[in-house]
Amino acid sequence: MEKNAEFFNERYKSKNIPWDLGKVDSSLIKIVTQNKIKPCKALEIGCGTGDNAIWLGSQGFKVIATDFSDLAVKKAKEKSKTKNVKIEFVVNDFLKTSFKKDFFEFVFDRGCFHSFDSYDDRKKIAENISSHMKKNGFWLSFMGNKDEKRKKGEMGPPQRSAEDIITAVEPFFKIIFLVSDYFDSKREKPPKAWICLMQKR
Ligand SMILES: C[S@@+](CC[C@H](N)C(=O)[O-])C[C@H]1O[C@@H](n2cnc3c(N)ncnc32)[C@H](O)[C@@H]1O
């Protein structure tokens, strides 16, 4: 099934959104803090209902957060108003559009890059992300990890191999680290994740 805006809107409408923590992912806090990523102009792609963008905004990052699900963006806007954090939320298909070139110093995605099944789409996304960034800017991505074996019928995030990631991003980014970890999750058994910090070439 094609994972287009309609597919994700349907998931948000039916509240079938196991990835939606209702709070910032603790790995984002850890990595931003440990790697001393300072407040700067930041972009989140596939921001969902906005908790991670809102946390970045609360830390002083100037955030533009995008998602192609208008339902998710509507919810994100409501949350940011309640929390009184100023974020620019934009409905945007990141595979098809670009809006600011050489602009951002930090890009974050949790579960967006991994949703692209083909090598061509992953490479296109990596190139598009890179084109929005200033040289030496950082991209932090959380992705499903194919090293986790699933039982038949078991649900979970799309899974990628290290090779899937490296071949798509390497032309545009230096990999600072690619580590195997777990998603912060509401599931009883948190899914295995890749956490990858990259720097624009
Ligand atoms: C697994 S969800 C993660 C949402 C959010 N990052 C979170 O952690 O709660 C993936 C998100 O990416 C968005 N997405 C997928 N493909 C996209 C695209 N081409 N352009 C913009 N957003 C996209 C979906 O609408 C969905 O909200």
Image: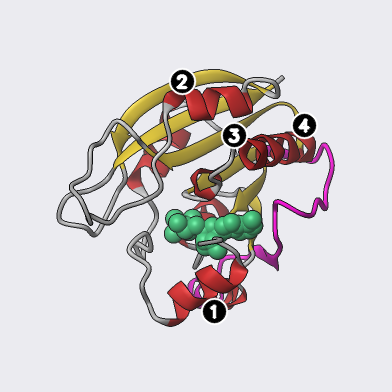
Residues in magenta?
A: 78-105
Mark 4 or mark 2, whichever is nearer to me: 2
| Other-residue count near label 4 (Cα within 10 Å), few / some / many at <14 / 14–19 / ≥20 | some
> How far apart in space, not on screen, are marks 3 and 4 (Cα)?
11 Å
Position of 69 relative to 31 (above/below): below
Assess whether mark 1 and mark 3 are in contact (beta carbons under 8 angstroms).
no
> Residue visible at 43% across and 36% down?
160
Q: How is the image coloured?
A: secondary structure
> How far apart in space, not on screen, are marks 1 and 2 (Cα)?
35 Å
Position of 138 relative to 58 (above/below): above
* Residue that label 3 marks: 139
Dividing the picture into quadrants, the one containing residue 153 is bottom left
Q: Earlier in the sequence, mark 4 or mark 1?
A: 1
The one of 6 and 35 positioned closer to us in this rendering: 6
| Residue 80 coordinates in the image, percent (x, y) | 54, 71
Name the element at disc 1.
Answer: helix
Q: Earlier in the sequence, mark 1 or mark 2?
A: 1
* Residue that label 2 marks: 177
| Other-residue count near label 3 (Cα within 10 Å), few / some / many at <14 / 14–19 / ≥20 | many
* Residue that label 4 marks: 134
Q: How many marks?
A: 4
The one of 94 and 137 positioned closer to us in this rendering: 94
Assess whether mark 1 and mark 4 are in contact (beta carbons under 8 angstroms).
no
**In this picture, residue 22 sits left or right of residue 44:** left
